[in-house]
Amino acid sequence: MAGLVYTLAQAYGFKTMLWTYIIPLMWVNHWIVMITYLHHTHTSLPKYAPESWTYLRGALATVDRDPGFVLRHMTHHIIDLHVVHHLFP
């Protein structure tokens, strides 16, 4: 992918690739990281010692958040169905 981006930047210019590929990629990744952080750092989540941790406990140690109707559909339910994602990847 890096080679393709480099080739396209040579053909169309770095500024074009920056605005059409790199900035949108960074914007999407920013939101995915932020959503993941919020799901896994809620104050009500239990913290397990290594000897008591199991896969199921770890999968359930996350929260679903309700972002509202618009964001729920714009993000294809990645915010409000996070626990299901851990149980059925």
Image (tube, grey):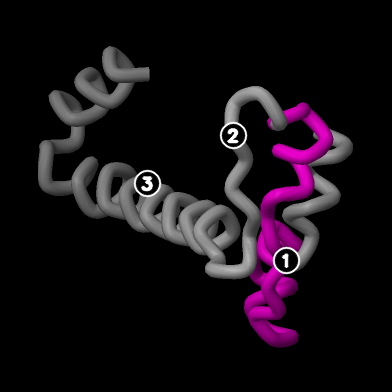
Who is closer to the viewer here, 68 or 11? 68
On the image, numbered disc 1 is attached to which residue?
64
Q: Residue at x 59, y 26 (%)?
A: 50
Q: Residues within 10 Å of mark 3 (few under 14, many from 20)?
A: few
* Helix, strand or loop under label 2: loop
Q: Given the image, on which type of amino acid does mark 2 rest?
A: Ala
Q: Horizontal and vertical percent for residue 87?
A: 85, 39
Q: Is residue 27 left or right of residue 7?
A: right
- The amino acid at mark 3 is Leu
- In the displayed structure, would residue 43 be above or below residue 22? below
Query: Around disc 1, counting alpha carbons within 10 Å, would you say few (fewer than 14), some (14 to 19), or many (20 or more)?
Result: some
Residue at the disc numbered 3:
25
Residue at 18% over, 30% down: 9
Q: Relative to residue 65, is residue 26 depicted above or below?
A: above
Q: Are marks 2 and 3 in contact (CB under 8 Å)?
A: no
Callout in the foreground (2, 3)? 2
Q: Which mark is residue 85?
A: none
Nearer-N-terminus badge (3/1) = 3
Query: Separation of disc 1 and disc 2 at Cα?
Result: 23 Å
Range covered by the magenta-colored residues: 53-79
Residue 8 in the image: above or below residue 72:
above
> Front-most of 7 and 2?
2
Q: Earlier in the sequence, mark 2 or mark 3?
A: 3
Residue named by callout 2: 49
Q: Is residue 80 magenta?
A: no
Identity of the amino acid at label 1?
A: Asp
Closer to the eye: label 3 or 1: 1
Q: Residues under labels 3 and 1: Cα distance?
A: 25 Å
The image quadrant where one finds the C terminus is top right
State the image coordinates of residue 3 (x, y, percent, origin top left): 28, 13
Residue name at image x 75 percent, y 67 percent = 80
Q: Quadrant of residue 57?
A: top right
